[in-house]
Image (spheres, rainbow, N blue to C red):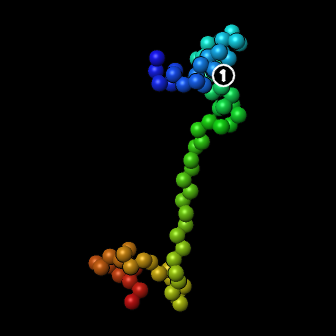
Amino acid sequence: MTAVESLPVYKKAEEIAQSRGDDLTTLIGAYLSGYVAAGYGPRRVVKVNTVRRFDRAESGRAIMPADWDDPEDAIYDNA
């Protein structure tokens, strides 16, 4: 007997399955099929790419974060 089988609910579920002429595995399978069919199954999480909005200089150019600056070129230099 496993830990799950020793639970009182397991015994009751087994009795319900037998009263319907099924075994517990069939009862669990039917429950899971209904669960998924009702739309409660695993949900696909879609990561949404967010747009980062930067502060703007008076000229209208985006002011990039200081840690993005590469000292070897003048691309992000706003000085």
Q: Which quadrant would residue 69 be assigned to in this image?
A: bottom left
Quadrant of image for the C terminus:
bottom left
Q: Position of residue 32 (x, y in %)?
A: 63, 27
Label 1 sits on what residue type?
A: Ala
Callout count: 1
Above or below, comparing residue 61 to residue 23 in the picture: below
Q: Residues within 10 Å of mark 1 (few under 14, many from 20)?
A: few
Q: Nearer the viewer, residue 14 or 58?
A: 14
Residue 70 in the image, given as x and y percentages of width and height:
32, 76
The structure residue drawn at horizontal position 63% and vertical position 20%, both measured from the top left corner, is 12
Q: Nearer the viewer, residue 71 or 25?
A: 25
SS category of the residue bearing label 1: helix
Residue 41: where, in percent of width, then height? 62, 36
Left or right position of 72 against 20: left
- The residue to which callout 1 is attached is 30
- Residue drawn at x 65%, y 37% as measured from the top left: 40
Which residue is at a point 38% across and 79% down the rendered structure image?
Answer: 66
Q: Is residue 26 visible?
A: no
Residue 27 visible to the viewer: yes
How far across and down, in percent of the image, does residue 3 sit?
47, 24
Up the image or down, 23 lies above or below 46; here it is above
- Specify whether 39 is left or right of 52: right
